[in-house]
Image (cartoon, rainbow, N blue to C red):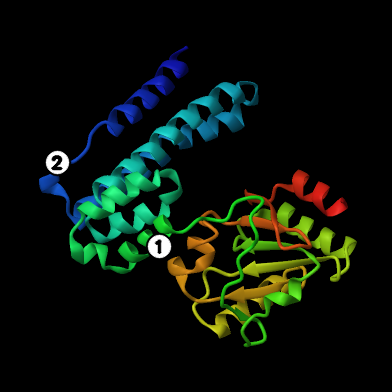
Amino acid sequence: IMKKIILLGVVASTLLACKQTPSATHITEDNYLKADSTLWAEFERDTEPLIEQMDAEPERFDVLYELYLSIEEATYKKNVELAMEYASVPSGLRRLYMIRRHIDKEQMRKIISEIPDSMQQSTYGQIIKQHIEADQIEESDNYHPFECMGEDGQMFDWSRLDGKKTLLLYGGLGCMGQQGRDMLKKWYEQYSRDDFQAVIYAPEVSNFEELVEDKKYWTNNGVIDYIAIADFLGDASPIKIIYGSQAKPTCFMIDRDGRVVIKSEGLNIERMEAFLKQ
């Protein structure tokens, strides 16, 4: 009982913190960085005991996990609120872009219209406007070819994918874990390159040499010989603006006619397996 009281108190304190927002006179870069740092430090402080208890008391996992999710939800809510509150400072505007999929576009448009013109004309001000105006690709849409470099140092020719089932994957070979990498390897062994191809966009690389090294690292560590691409544009890349990718990995399974049939954060293995077997 005492443990439940303590845990509920942790949740209540987190939710209470979410109601505390800075006044307009305190909208500075330093204050945003402090608020953001405090938010995630508190998240770790409040969830670490729960994670330890879930390991130690597996019979109470469901109850503890619900408490974890409530803290996570409150933290993410505060994360969005902070980004909206501090959109007029550089780090706040960057975070606004990172959580753009969780804010209605009309609300986003209003926020951008109210920040200083210098911030509207900044890199993140401009790419947020591009996000607002673009129709992000969803399931049943045709995929969108964009200019990028392949691992051979040439501009990637998207026509290489014509007539094939394709997995276009935004980063995340590390994030997907060994199970995901093993699944990619299984699909490559199960289907020929005339039937299935994996194209992986590397978001972390900033030049061609890094793209080659990234591909070399993963193939040396047992990942299939996928097609590696990048455009070195960071957050301004079409794969983030047009495709709406943010989480790693974000996956787009494309049919032989170029239509996106599955869009998911992480590998939706069950749906993808079913699609490839068709």
**Circle 1 Cα neighbour tier, 10 Å, few/some/many (<14 / 14–19 / ≥20):** some
Determine whether the residue tagged by mark 2 lies in a helix, strand or loop: loop
Residue depicted at x 33% and y 44%:
107
Q: Secondary structure at mark 1?
A: helix
**Dot 2 crowding, Cα within 10 Å, few <14, some 14–19, many 20+:** few
Numbered label attached to residue 157: none
Q: Position of residue 23 (x, y in %)?
A: 14, 41
- Who's the residue at 88% across and 63% down the image? 191
For residue 15, above or below residue 103? above
Is 60 situated above or below 276? above
The mark found on residue 23 in the picture is 2
Q: Of 170 and 38, which appears nearest the observer? A: 170
Residue drawn 61% across the image and 84% down it = 155
The answer to whether residue 95 is left or right of residue 118 is right
Closest to the camera, between mark 1 and mark 2, is 1
Q: Amino acid at mark 2?
A: Ser
In the figure, 19 relative to 125: above or below?
above
Q: Could you give the CA–CA distance between mark 1 and mark 2, rounded to whole angstroms?
A: 29 Å
Pointer 1: what residue? 130
Q: Nearer the viewer, residue 109 or 276?
A: 109
Do we see residue 47 in this rendering?
yes
In the displayed structure image, the side of residue 239 where residue 234 appears, left or right: left
Identify which residue, 260 or 101, lies in the foreground. Answer: 260
